[in-house]
Image: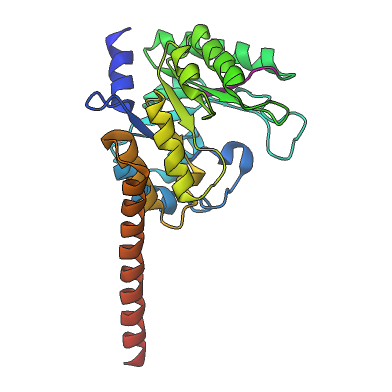
Amino acid sequence: MDWGKQNRISRIIKPSSGKAVMLAVDHGYFMGPTTGLEKLDEAVNPLLPYADTLMLTRGALRYYIDPGVDIPITLRVSGGTSILNKEALLHEGIICSIEDAIRLNASCVAFSILVGAEYERDTILGFTEVIDEATAYGIPTLCVTAVGREMVRDARYMSLASRLGAELGADIIKTYYVPGFDKVVEKCPVPVVIAGGKKIPEKDALQMARDAIDAGAVGVDMGRNIFQSTSPVGMIQAVRAVVHKGATVKEGLEIFKGVKAKEAEKARKAKAKAKARARK
């Protein structure tokens, strides 16, 4: 591996722990103003100190993120359909050139493949084109193993999709946590992170992260389970403790509840001060 690519990967997967907390906020490329990301900058900025990388589109990066912020960028470079197009959902192609990724100083580029679906070939060939171009400039690639509605989420399918992505040349695989996940990791020669998926209770999301790390994943790439939480800052701190420090689910939940309680107290005091000023 070239020094440049290895250096970029080390900015995401921290050498000190061998783990990564990726914050995914790229949902707008096919979902539009996703709940919790209506004002992306306000939602994301408080979370950046606790994320190892920020995964988003080039438009969101340019319009919402301060260039002075020190955060490695994982740039979404695949797309082409919206949530309204049910039949062609995830029939993705290249939506961003490698030159623009370089202009944006991306540390990694992300592309979704849909294994076993009607548009499998198109997404795979599109990804290999991205791999060739990114590799020429020493930029790592993240393969997102997307799952269509007709696909079964089990270890056999995830192993197939993850190994396929790695054999195509991906440097990191993003896939879903499933029972038997240790077999998925064992059969994949590159680091694996899990997708957060749809919003679930905080305890369940922390349990999923804990189980994935115990099964050999190097980290998580969570979005909705963080920015749609009742305390996004508390949740990302809890996830970070589980991933990087080996915290238990109970310990992570205590971190989440503690931050949430402090936020509530701060909001209560601010409200009381506002009322006092209004009386004057």
Residue that protrudes farthest toward the bottom in the picture: 280
Magenta segment includes 166: no
Q: Position of residue 159 (x, y in %)?
A: 55, 16
- Placement of 182 over or under 258, stated as above or below: above
* Residue 276 seen in this snapshot: yes
Residue visible at 51% across and 52% down in the picture: 36
Question: What predominant SS class does the magenta segment belong to?
Answer: strand
Residue visible at 46% across and 23% down in the picture: 109
Q: Which residues are magenta?
A: 111-116
Q: Quadrant of residue 52?
A: top left
* Residue 23 seen in this snapshot: no
- Placement of 118 over or under 30, stated as above or below: above
Nearer-the-camera pick, 233 or 179: 179
Residue visible at 41% across and 56% down in the picture: 231
Nearer-the-camera pick, 26 or 215: 215
Q: Quadrant of residue 128?
A: top right
Q: What number of labels is visible?
A: 0
* On-image quarter of the C terminus: bottom left
Q: Position of residue 211 (x, y in %)?
A: 43, 33
